[in-house]
Amino acid sequence: MKNITVIQTLILACIIILIASCSNTRHLPAGERLYTGNKVTIKDNYPKKKEKKILIHDLSNLVRPKPNTTFLGMRLKLRMYTAAGDTKKKKGIRQWMRNKVGEPPVLASSIHLPPNKELMLNYLMNRGYFYASVKAEMKEEKHNKAQAIFDVKTGDQYIINKVEFRKDTSDISGDVDSSFSKTLLKPGSPYNLNLIKAERIRIDRDLKERGFFYFSPEYILVVVDTSIGDHKVNMYVRLKHREIPVEAYQSFSINNIYIYANYKLNGKQADTSKANMINIDNYYVIDNKKAFKPTIFSQAMIFEKGDEYSMDDQNASLSRLVNMGTFKFVKNRFEVNSDSLLDVFYYLTPFARKSIRFEIGALTQNDNRAGTQASITWKNRNAFKGAEQLSFKINGSLELQYSGIQKQPNIYNFGAETNLSLPRFAIPFYNIATTSRYLPRTIFKLKYQYESEANLLRINSYTAAYGYSWKQGTHIQHQLYPLSFTYVKTDTLGSTEKLNRLYNNLVFNGIIAGSTYEFTYSSQGNVTRKNSFYFDGLIDIAGNAIGIAEKADYKKGQRLLFGSPYAQYVKLQPDFRYYYRFSKETGIATRVLAGIGLPMGNSDRLPNVKQFWAGGNSDMRGFPSRLVGPGIFNEYVASKNAKYIETLGDIKLEGNFEVRQKLYKFIEGAIFMDAGNIWLFNENPDFPGGKISNSFYKEISADAGIGLRLDFSILLLRFDLGMPIREAWLPENDRWVFDQIAFSNKDWRRRNMVFNIGIGYPF
């Protein structure tokens, strides 16, 4: 019974409410007490306040076993275990509650204090508290509960007085000595065993960059002398010559490099013959199927024949081969050719050259629209034998309104797209060689999109783009499109009156020709960090060169390019996010997004596809999709009815805050708050109060709500329920609407409660 159905989830929620007041200790075995956790107290004043906080946290986490898990102060899993009672059945709701969801009680008798004391003393010793002591007892509490109490006396923490490398006559000793100024062991720092281990690794990595292929951190000894007194230590770093093998003293250089381009992993008889190999730029390529141009390997490799062995270069070369996207498996091995030379062998197992992928899914909007979408993608991972990735994609979707006060038109979409990605910078008359672990990409795009809005509109758009994508290390990525050209043609089918009512802010006919640059930084990949950051900055410029040359002014009539008006603007969009984890189960996520579009010369506003919107399932979740703002404008207030399909703006400011709490395995809860709005750069009579002003900060709308997420690893389903708490279109002194909340009122719920369904986190 690995998967829990929706019905089971609802039953679980009901059961949690019913048993919230049940006793955790009623069904304990006779004479037993429930273990509620531990309390660590530092009884002396030696550690500083910050250090003491770290010690208490770390020492407390060492104690085993852990107490029963809690959520909001309640031991829900334990309560479900006891509420289910004993059952011999292998199936059924009681068995599921007790053994799948529930958690047996952690008894005080299972806590063995002496081993936990030893763990604490060992930890303190490793942090420089050489004469620490720990007293432990199990303290009985009311209601058959017990807590482990640990009283700790740390004594003085030993400090590093002097660090010295004991140099000898060997060549490798001289190499260590030459880089010892970079040592992590600094006089004045506290003694820390983890720092000593890190220093050994640092020395090893430095030697690996100098060709010492067979060296290991285990060959380094750090002698600690505590006899100098005054709670200080001297450290002497030296080599363990008795344990170092002969080959570890030798610095190696690269000799021959062999690349097997069609290696069969786990084949009956792997082909490692050197027959028919081709020498390209001093690389030997063995490709009996002639599936690849040999030059792509010389472009991917970082080191060459004659280079000193370097671990960084080795790892970078492996990474670049993997990031080609053409090879399923990449591995290498080194073989001693002579006393100081290494031969390198790379074994590459390609993906299937061609593949077809079919996707179908459902979509929903929080304005009572739902639909389906499907796509078929054909991909060639080695289109022209240079690891080029060529793809053709056809997609379609439809959105239908299933309820709502204002009837919205059905929307039908069809699209076709071609992408060609080259694993290098393709720049005419110029060659850029990179040494990053990630190969750059040159991208060519052709795209056609057709959209039908029932009997009102037919929109055809054609896009051609040429650009580059490259990573600068693990955390930084760049995307530059020096040329992007989009032509949009809209055919109106419905009545002018109806069209103006629904679409007067959405219709764009003309050309968008310009350049974009996007910078992304993310530290989220480091799972050991408590805090992480994400930043995405976009610069989008269109039509300015020709607009400035022609002295375009939309007030005097728009200028044309190829017989169509062209957009002229500058758009900036920074997106900053901060994440903090209190524990594995609890964390916060925040986002601040700002955007400003400056229509210039030939445009009085941004094209609708470049404008900002507010409201929706990944935006401001307590408001209808794309219908917040601009400014203090509100369509329902202005017309007493829904007038627009969506409202857009040239400027946007938004902030989001969310607390995320893991409830059970794949179930996560959330509490969130969103705030923001959009504004117009120029006055528009259709949107009174929509223009940006000096009092824009008073025109912020806000919402709050709760969420439930089902994380199935490959898919995260998100359900959010939000409501407005500040409405910017109301009179200035009446914009906070806390006093109007009425959950029991059906009409209030219908007007204010917004249910969102999404895939993935909102940010």
Image (tube, rainbow, N blue to C red):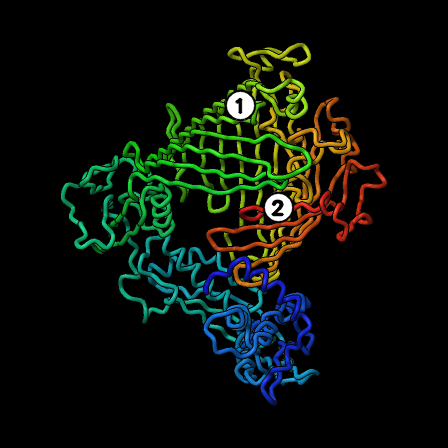
Amino acid at dot 2: Asn
Residue 731's quadrant in the figure? Answer: top right
Side (left or right) of 709 relative to 697? left
- Report the residue marked by disc 2: 756
Amino acid at dot 1: Ile
**Of 3 and 253, the residue lying toward us:** 3
Reply above or below: 74 against 367: below
Number of numbered discs = 2
Indicate the secondary structure of the residue bearing disc 2: strand
Label 2 or label 1, whichever comes before in sequence order: 1
Side (left or right) of 332 relative to 150? left
The residue that appears at 34% across and 43% down in the rendered structure is 302
Reply above or below: 102 against 601: below
Residue 26's quadrant in the figure? Answer: bottom right
**Of 60 and 356, the residue lying toward us:** 356
- Report the residue marked by disc 1: 459
